[in-house]
Image (cartoon, rainbow, N blue to C red):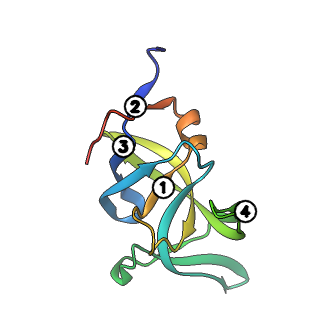
C-alpha cells in the first residue's frame, strides 16, 4: 500500500472547529460522492445587497452559523430523488489531522449518522477506508 495514504475506519469521530462542532461520529461512505452535514433552519438571505447562508448545525440554536462562501449543487439521494443543496467549505479533524472539506447541508434528522463523508474527500486527501477499523 502507498505510504502516503492514511487509513481510517468506516466510522470516525470527527470535529468541525470552524463550525463549533466537536466529537461527532461520521459515517465514511465510499458510495457517496459528496459529504453531508446535518443542519436545520437552512436559509439563504440577502444582507446589504449580498447573499448569505444561515444554518443551525445539529439543531443547536446556540451555534447558529452564517457564511458568505457557499454555493448550491444538485444531489441525488440513495432513493433516487434529486434536490438542490447548499455546499459550504470548512475544516474537519479526523484522527488529529485537519483537512479542508466541502459539505452539503442537509436535514439528516431521520438518519442514523448526522455526518456523511464521501469518496471525493477521501480521494483528494489520500484516505483509505479499512472496514475492520471501527473507532467510536
| C-alpha gap between disc 4 and disc 1 | 17 Å
Side (left or right) of 2 relative to 119: left
Q: Which mark is residue 130?
A: 2
Residue at image mark 1: 116
Q: Which residue is mark 4?
A: 73
* Disc on the earlier residue, 2 or 3: 3
- 1 and 2 marks in contact (CB < 8 Å): no
Q: Which is closer to the viewer, label 4 or label 1?
A: 1
The residue carrying pointer 3 sits among few (fewer than 14), some (14 to 19) or many (20 or more) residues within 10 Å by Cα, namely: some
Disc nearer the start of the sequence (3/4): 4
Q: Which residue is mark 3?
A: 94
Left/right placement of residue 70 relative to residue 112 reads right
- Above/below status of 118 relative to 60: above
Q: Is residue 109 left or right of residue 68?
A: left
Between the residue at mark 2 and the residue at mark 4, the CA separation in whole angstroms equals 30 Å
Rendered residue at 35%/65% (across/down) = 20
**Closer to viewer: mark 1 or mark 2:** 2
Separation (CA) of disc 2 from disc 3: 14 Å
Above or below for 52 versus 102: below
Amino acid at each position: 500500500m502507498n505510504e502516503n495514504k492514511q487509513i481510517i475506519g468506516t466510522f470516525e469521530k470527527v470535529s468541525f472547529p470552524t463550525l463549533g462542532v466537536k466529537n461527532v461520529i461520521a459515517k465514511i461512505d465510499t458510495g457517496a460522492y459528496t459529504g453531508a452535514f446535518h443542519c436545520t433552519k437552512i436559509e439563504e438571505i440577502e444582507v446589504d445587497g449580498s447573499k448569505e447562508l444561515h444554518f443551525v448545525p445539529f439543531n443547536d440554536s446556540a451555534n447558529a452559523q452564517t457564511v458568505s462562501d457557499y454555493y448550491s449543487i444538485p444531489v441525488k439521494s440513495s432513493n433516487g430523488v434529486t434536490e438542490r443543496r447548499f455546499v459550504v467549505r470548512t475544516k474537519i479533524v479526523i484522527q488529529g489531522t485537519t483537512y479542508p472539506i466541502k459539505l452539503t447541508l442537509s436535514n439528516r434528522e431521520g438518519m442514523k449518522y448526522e455526518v456523511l463523508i464521501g469518496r471525493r474527500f477521501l480521494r483528494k486527501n489520500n484516505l483509505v477506508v479499512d472496514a475492520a477499523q471501527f473507532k467510536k
